[in-house]
Image (cartoon, grey):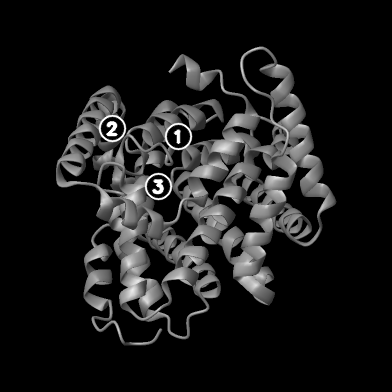
Amino acid sequence: MDRARSESLGDRLEQAIERHADTAGEIERAQAAEPPRGRLRRTVMWLAITGVSLYLVLPSVIEVFGSWRRITEFSLLALAAMAGLQAASLACLWALQHVALRARRWRPVIASQLAGNALSKIAPGGGALGAALQYRMLVQAGLPAGSTVAALTAVNLLVFAVVLALPVLAIPALLRGAVDRSLLETAIAGLVIFAVAAGAGAVLLSTDRPLAWIGRTVQRVRNRLRRRRAQPLDALPDRLLRERDRILQTLGPRWKRALAATVGRWLFDYGTLLAALAAIGSHPRPGLVLLAFSGAQVLAQIPVTPGGLGFVEAGLTAMLALAGVSAGDAVLATFAYRLFSYWLPLPFGLLGLALAPRAAAQQA
């Protein structure tokens, strides 16, 4: 744990690139090549890690779920708005994957995403299993294996890159914002930040110099912080450019549409949290609300519990309290947000399996 805390920004960025560059096809091939005893041992290990982790975060989960009786404080309009915002977020993700996969039909994309997302949220180490399931379903629907691997990799890199950028873009709002703000001002601040994220993403995807400068800066800071404890980095800018080029090669001329869908995916998800806060009459600080949201998405990447269960609840509740939301309202807002973003999509995984084309010869 201490070692994880001491990792520098450069190490985390490099590890994030490596982790999200892992392809579903490689995962599937590794699982197929692994002997049964090895798979059993790995499964038992993940179950043990997940069990211990859930035990540690259980108080936060119980506290959040203990607020379910207060769901009556939400009007039907507020609940409908949160459901609609989550549906729009999912639609943006489907659009992004549709562009990356260059699929002619939407059904395989939607069905595989619903099923893979559900599996990733209920299985230990579910991110890899969810990606492998989606890959298998897409290939069974008739998509080429190689291009499917590249598309899923590009989608993961692009989605995660926007998440990493949001906390940085929230800093100006955090420094200049007043403690008490209306939800309208908070929403406007969020829209501005997401618009800036879209513009910055377009610049980084279309030009080399800004991305190379970011790589050199992160590399320089990392090497200074860990001068005596690790081998210095010397190729991070080139690596960032290579990964960017891989994304562009996969997305093709429709990369602008893909970038808009990526930003929209997180914008509508962020709107779900704002709708929960608006429904209970909270007036949080805009920068800290966005930081709380961004932190929750990073915590959701922790693989020791499915979908970051427990870690997200604890982190989001604490950050909302720092943003000026009362403790009780922070717990309730977290419960409402996770209800729509985590729990309600799970049953749709079965729908995805039911909608999936069965014949491998079918074309997408």
Q: Please report the residue visible at 43 percent of the width from the left and 31 percent of the height from the top.
A: 317
Give how far across and how far down residue 94 sits, in percent: 46, 70
Near mark 3 (Cα within 10 A), the count class, few <14, some 14-19 or many ≥20, is many
Near mark 1 (Cα within 10 A), the count class, few <14, some 14-19 or many ≥20, is many
Give how far across and how far down residue 166 sits, in percent: 63, 44
Tell me: residue 114, above or below residue 200. below
Amino acid beneath label 2: Val
Amino acid beneath label 3: Tyr
Q: Is residue 286 visible?
A: yes
Amino acid beneath label 1: Leu
Near mark 2 (Cα within 10 A), the count class, few <14, some 14-19 or many ≥20, is many
Q: In whole angstroms, how far apart are the C-alphas of marks 1 and 3?
A: 10 Å
Q: Which residue is mark 1?
A: 316
Q: In whole angstroms, how far apart are the C-alphas of marks 2 and 3?
A: 13 Å
Give how far across and how far down residue 56 sits, in percent: 28, 22
- Residue 16 versus residue 123: which sits nearer the camera? 16
Question: Mark 1–mark 3 contact, CB under 8 Å?
Answer: yes
Tell me: residue 149, above or below residue 363. above
**Secondary structure at numbered mark 2:** helix
**Secondary structure at numbered mark 3:** helix
Q: Which residue is mark 3?
A: 337
- Residue 279 versus residue 3: which sits nearer the camera? 3
Q: Which residue is mark 2?
A: 61
